Image: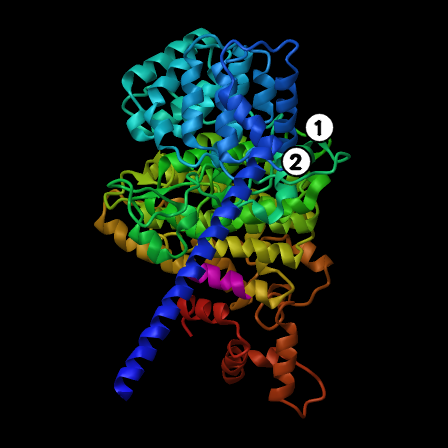
């Protein structure tokens, strides 16, 4: 009985619970229906939604004149566009309305100017609008305005695959003279290797014969040549004017305002790299040439869980580690704003690993435009007006070049022009660092491009600029020699100087360029040291250069030996500081080691040869140093520096020939005095000549060597038999 009672209670409770759940579910569904009805009611009453519905449903042929309804609805759309921007659906509706000419051509320009997207632009809408261009009824001014709009919002288009699929259709518009510059720019952004065809190359060459060597045609042809060099036989000039203008009006300033008002509602990946500038600033400040764009995807879609195709493209912005980069290295799509590459080490790693010539061409194009507009095309002084922004830009460029361990061709071309107008003070550390990264220049051009402007700057600038330039040229030589040692072919017949350039040079041509650079530095240093009264700082930077020169054979494998000129050797030998003399001794020791090794190899290889003049100069310097520092025969007839006996007598210097020995040399005099006091502490009168005795002399040498003069120690051990 109790069991029946319990069962009855349990059933009653279950039925009650089920009834409660049913009531709750009905209540919840009723709330959702009410909310949905409320939302639809609000949307139906929203004037902006009604305006979009009007433009979506308006029939073709509806008149514009006297039509207050179209004016009222268009004002609502414009108000929303300029305040908050338009959503992708609104962009599709208004773009279709404008390009289909349902109400004629009167409103087309006005509608296109208010197409300000909030987050993105549907690719399908752009494709449909491009198809409308082929109808032939749209005025050419409207066509140009539309293509400019596409170029402006290109990075905000959610995908590019359909656009690339109609590449041939877009290419047909290059024959329109007014559209050609803008279509070439759009094609440049869409071009892939499979887009390059013989008939397209022929068409561009035919247009060039009609229009002349226009920059926009040359830049598109240069990209074609990167992908298919066998199809483009045209010689592309290395220095071209800006090919594609910055088509930023009338949308960019409005887009800035829209994104600023939306704040966090705008996705970072879709945010354009614009910043508002002070109207009172210079022309350069308004154009904002040196702002690096943020790294954003060229395809602004979220990653999908299931691949939409066999080879899914992955935007580089979605790669966050080197492991991800390696796993997807052949599916990476670069951003459309190539300037953003300079701000990411991961992107530079991709650029270095893949060596994508098209990416480098686009990056160099952007970089060349930025540098030229910053330093050349601003009548108000450009960089000096905005030194902080320019400084940050150049530092970012330098860090990128340092990461890649080579310079960009566009910065090289810029430097050749800029050196002719540079005052030597503006952004000096950055310019000199950029200069040290330029690749090897053929010996026939190095004088005109590099030596002539640098020589004028060197002789008209301060001593500190001279030191900076010497350091720059030392780094330049070091990088040239490093490139040679890394990229030289085993047969020594042809070397590629850079993995990212097409510069090829024979070994003899490379040697000629290096020799020209060494001789140029020797001439600068000889005159500069004399002008600056043998300043120890300038002498130190000069010896840095020759520490690299003396090891060109053993350290870098280059069969070339160039001795320092007398204008460098003798100031270092007679310097008043011991460090300079010690470094000169080390340099001469390394010269001997390299020349000895070169002479041994010369016997084995007939093609290897060091000139006899080099050996004669080296032997002469060695004899001078030994006679000066060791034998105390400085002014001996026929050896080293020669002075008439009458001049020596007039100088009233006792024992003039010994004045530059290791004891009496101005650089070592203080060490000799200190050694004498330690060796003979009880003597009241000091006789430094007593150090010349056998045992004190050996002790004195050990004393000098223990002071850290390793270069002097190596020189003595390799050139003097004790």
Could you say which is closer to the camera, residue 618 or residue 604? 604
Q: CA distance from mark 1 to mark 2?
A: 35 Å
Q: Which residue is mark 1?
A: 379
Q: Residue furthest left?
A: 604
Crowdedness of circle 2 by 10 Å Cα count: few (<14), some, many (20+)? some
The answer to whether 133 is drawn above or below residue 562 in the figure is above
Q: Which residues are magenta?
A: 582-589
Could you say which is closer to the camera, residue 303 or residue 45? 45
In this rendering, the count of numbered labels is 2
The answer to whether 69 is drawn above or below residue 640 in the figure is above
Identify the element where label 1 is drawn. Answer: loop
The residue at the point 57 percent across, 60 percent down is 573
| Mark toward the start of the polypeptide (1 vs 2) | 2
Q: Is residue 87 left or right of residue 686?
A: left
Could you say which is closer to the camera, residue 487 or residue 605? 487
Q: Is residue 587 magenta?
A: yes
């Amino acid at each position: 009985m109790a069991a029946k009672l319990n069962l009855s209670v349990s059933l009653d409770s279950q039925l009650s619970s089920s009834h409660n759940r049913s009531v709750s579910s009905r209540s919840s569904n009723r709330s959702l229906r009410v909310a949905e009805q409320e939302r639809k009611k609000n949307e139906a009453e929203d004037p902006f939604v009604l305006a979009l519905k009007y433009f979506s449903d308006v029939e073709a042929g509806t008149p514009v004149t006297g039509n207050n309804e179209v004016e009222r609805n268009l004002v609502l759309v414009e108000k929303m566009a300029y305040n908050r921007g338009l959503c992708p659906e609104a962009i599709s509706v208004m773009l279709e309305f404008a390009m289909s000419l349902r109400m004629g051509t009167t409103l087309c320009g006005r509608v296109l100017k208010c197409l300000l997207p909030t987050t993105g632009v549907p690719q399908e809408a752009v494709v449909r609008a491009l198809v409308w261009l082929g109808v032939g009824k749209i005025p050419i001014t409207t066509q140009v305005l539309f293509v400019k709009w596409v170029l402006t919002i290109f990075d905000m288009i959610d995908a590019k695959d359909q656009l690339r699929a109609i590449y041939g259709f877009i290419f047909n518009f290059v024959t329109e003279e007014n559209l050609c510059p803008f279509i070439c720019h759009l094609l440049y952004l869409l071009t892939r290797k499979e887009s390059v065809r013989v008939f397209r190359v022929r068409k561009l060459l035919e247009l060039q014969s009609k229009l002349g060597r226009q920059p926009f045609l040359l830049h598109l042809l240069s990209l074609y040549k990167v992908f298919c060099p066998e199809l483009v036989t045209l010689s592309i000039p290395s220095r071209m004017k800006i090919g594609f203008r910055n088509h930023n009006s009338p949308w960019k300033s409005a887009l800035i305002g829209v994104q600023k008002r939306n704040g966090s509602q705008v996705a970072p990946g879709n945010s354009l790299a614009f910043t508002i500038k002070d109207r009172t600033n210079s022309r350069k400040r308004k154009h904002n040439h040196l702002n690096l764009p943020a790294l954003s995807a060229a395809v602004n879609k979220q990653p999908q869980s299931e691949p939409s195709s066999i080879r899914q493209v992955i935007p580089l912005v979605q790669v966050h580690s080197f492991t991800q980069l390696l796993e997807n290295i052949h599916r990476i799509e670069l951003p459309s704003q190539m300037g953003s590459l300079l701000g990411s080490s991961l992107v530079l790693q991709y650029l270095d690993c893949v060596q994508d010539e098209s990416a480098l061409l686009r990056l160099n194009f952007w970089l060349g435009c930025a540098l030229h507009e910053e330093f050349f095309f601003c009548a108000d002084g450009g960089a000096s007006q905005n030194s902080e922004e320019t400084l940050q830009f150049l530092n970012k460029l330098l860090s990128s070049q340092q990461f890649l361990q080579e310079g960009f061709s566009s910065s090289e071309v810029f430097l050749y022009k800029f050196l002719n107008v540079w005052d030597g003070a503006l952004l000096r550390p950055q310019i000199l660092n950029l200069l040290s990264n330029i690749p090897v220049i053929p010996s026939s051009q190095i004088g005109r491009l590099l030596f002539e402007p640098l020589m004028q700057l060197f002789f008209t600038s301060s001593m500190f600029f001279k030191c900076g330039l010497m350091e720059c040229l030392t780094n330049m030589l070091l990088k040239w020699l490093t490139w040679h040692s890394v990229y030289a072919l085993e047969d020594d017949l042809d070397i590629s100087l850079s993995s990212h350039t097409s510069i090829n040079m024979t070994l003899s041509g490379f040697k000629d360029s290096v020799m020209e650079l060494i001789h140029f530095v020797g001439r600068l240093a000889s005159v500069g040291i004399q002008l600056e009264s043998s300043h120890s700082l300038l002498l130190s930077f000069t010896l840095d250069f020759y520490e690299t020169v003396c090891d060109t054979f053993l350290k870098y494998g280059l069969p070339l030996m160039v001795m320092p000129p007398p204008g460098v050797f003798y100031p270092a030998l007679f310097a008043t500081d011991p460090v300079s003399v010690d470094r000169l001794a080390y340099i001469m020791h390394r010269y001997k080691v390299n020349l000895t090794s070169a002479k041994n190899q010369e016997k084995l290889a007939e093609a290897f040869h060091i000139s006899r003049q080099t050996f004669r100069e080296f032997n002469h310097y060695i004899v001078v140093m030994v006679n000066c520092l060791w034998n105390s025969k400085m002014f001996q007839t026929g050896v080293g520096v020669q002075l008439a006996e009458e001049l020596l007598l007039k100088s009233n210097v006792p024992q003039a020939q010994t004045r530059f020995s290791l004891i009496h040399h101005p650089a070592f005099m203080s060490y000799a005095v200190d050694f004498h006091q330690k060796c003979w502490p009880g003597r009241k009168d000091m006789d430094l000549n007593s150090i010349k005795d056998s045992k004190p002399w050996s002790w004195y040498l050990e004393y000098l060597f223990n002071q850290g003069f390793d270069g002097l120690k190596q020189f003595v051990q390799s050139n003097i038999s004790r």
